[in-house]
């Protein structure tokens, strides 16, 4: 078997057994394709599965160095993601195709400084939801945009999770079953304000909402796209004078930081956000601490 056949088998494994998302599959495919193309040039011949078992630390470091430079150099985070995909591919070769390579684990990726989440403030979130009317949109479209943004902030959903809701989910019950990353499901409590925003949209939408169809519709009746939500928030940034940090995902970050500031524990926030690891959720403690210090410096008479 050559390396390209092995890559195809690996992607099939990820798609059908690991239930990886289409975006994850495409990212992994691109990373490993670039890696195999480099090895073919590096060795001057078609790469076989057995040759992958003989890849040295020097070979892998040479590949990473080539991606660091060149016409389109990768940033540290992208380089680390590429290395992660290569390691996952080699783990598949070891477990499924009996082709281990201990050298792969010896190569360290670039150090990445973990960035803290960038939430919007409570007032900014309220303003974003209140100012969705651009003077040209139909009332139902304004209600739709308000409902989507309220979902992101009130339930801590990702854009893809909010837009995956079906018409059968309305009227919205006290909690929603959300299918998140990696096919993991979680229960998201629904606040009355979220329920009211969705009910207002459903009452105005001009299209027939079949139970299995998308709840949120675009102007021509098709499913609403993430790009529309991103463009809406980009327009709101300019109107409200917000920084580029004010993104749709910043509303999800705001959901977490506001809960943390109100005394919610990290484990509960982890469950509500659908994080696989508590380490991911712990990043919000840095944001909360920064907010406390800012309030202290502004309020204390000796600051």
Image (cartoon, helix red, strand yellow):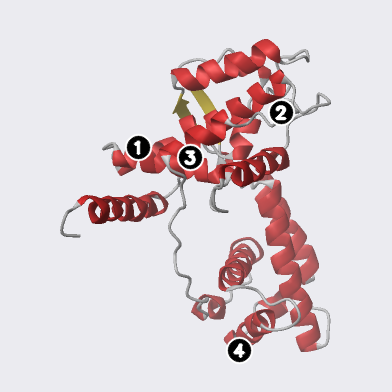
Of the residues under marks 2 and 4, which one precedes in the sequence? 4
Side (left or right) of 232 relative to 4: left
Q: Which residue is mark 3?
A: 124
Say which quadrant the N terminus sits in.
bottom right
Q: Which residue is mark 2?
A: 135
Q: CA distance from mark 2 to mark 3?
A: 20 Å
Of the residues under marks 1 and 2, which one precedes in the sequence? 2
Does residue 142 appear anywhere in the picture? yes
**SS under mark 1:** helix
Side (left or right) of 75 relative to 115: right
Say which of marks 1 and 4 sits in front: 1
**SS under mark 3:** helix
Badge 3 crowding class, 10 Å Cα cut-off, few under 14, some 14 to 19, many 20 or more, is: some
Q: Residue at x 68, y 60 (%)?
A: 28
Q: CA distance from mark 4 to mark 3?
A: 50 Å
Task: Please tell me in which quadrant of the rendered image residue 64 appears.
Answer: bottom right
Q: Residue at x 34, y 56 (%)?
A: 286
Of the residues under marks 3 and 1, which one precedes in the sequence? 3
**SS under mark 2:** loop
In the rendered structure, find residue 58 and report the number of the disc placed on it: 4
Task: Please tell me in which quadrant of the rendered image residue 229 appears.
Answer: top right
Q: Position of residue 73 (x, y in %)?
A: 68, 77
Q: Position of residue 201 (x, y in %)?
A: 64, 17
Q: State yes or no: discs 2 and 3 in contact (Cβ < 8 Å).
A: no
Q: CA distance from mark 2 to mark 4?
A: 60 Å
Badge 2 crowding class, 10 Å Cα cut-off, few under 14, some 14 to 19, many 20 or more, is: few
**SS under mark 4:** helix
Q: CA distance from mark 1 to mark 2?
A: 33 Å
Q: Position of residue 122 (x, y in %)?
A: 42, 37
Q: Which residue is mark 1?
A: 259
């Amino acid at each position: 078997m050559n390396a390209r056949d092995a890559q195809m088998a690996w992607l099939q494994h990820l798609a059908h057994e690991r239930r990886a998302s289409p975006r994850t599959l495409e990212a992994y495919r691109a990373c490993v394709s670039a890696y195999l193309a480099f090895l073919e040039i590096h060795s001057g011949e078609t790469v076989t599965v057995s040759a992958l078992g003989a890849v040295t630390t020097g070979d892998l470091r040479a590949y990473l160095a080539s991606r660091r430079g060149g016409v389109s150099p990768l940033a540290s985070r992208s380089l680390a993601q590429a290395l992660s995909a290569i390691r996952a591919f080699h783990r598949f070769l070891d477990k499924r195709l009996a082709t281990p390579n201990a050298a792969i684990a010896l190569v360290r990726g670039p150090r990445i400084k973990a960035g803290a989440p960038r939430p919007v403030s409570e007032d900014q979130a309220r303003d974003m939801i209140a100012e969705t009317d651009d003077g040209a949109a139909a009332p139902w479209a304004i209600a739709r945009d308000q409902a989507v943004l309220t979902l992101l902030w009130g339930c801590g959903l990702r854009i893809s999770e909010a837009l995956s809701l079906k018409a059968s989910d309305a009227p919205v019950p006290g909690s929603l079953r959300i299918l998140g990353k990696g096919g993991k499901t979680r229960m998201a409590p629904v606040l009355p304000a979220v329920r009211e925003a969705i009910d207002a949209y459903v009452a105005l939408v001009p299209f027939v909402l079949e139970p299995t169809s998308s709840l949120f519709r675009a102007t021509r009746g098709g499913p609403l796209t993430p790009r529309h939500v991103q463009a809406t928030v980009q327009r709101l940034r300019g109107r409200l004078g917000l920084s580029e940090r004010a993104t749709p995902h910043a509303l999800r970050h705001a959901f977490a930081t506001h809960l943390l500031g109100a005394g919610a524990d990290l484990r509960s926030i982890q469950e509500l956000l659908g994080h696989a690891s508590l380490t991911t959720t712990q990043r919000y403690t840095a944001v909360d601490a920064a907010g406390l210090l800012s309030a202290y410096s502004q309020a204390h008479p000796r600051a």
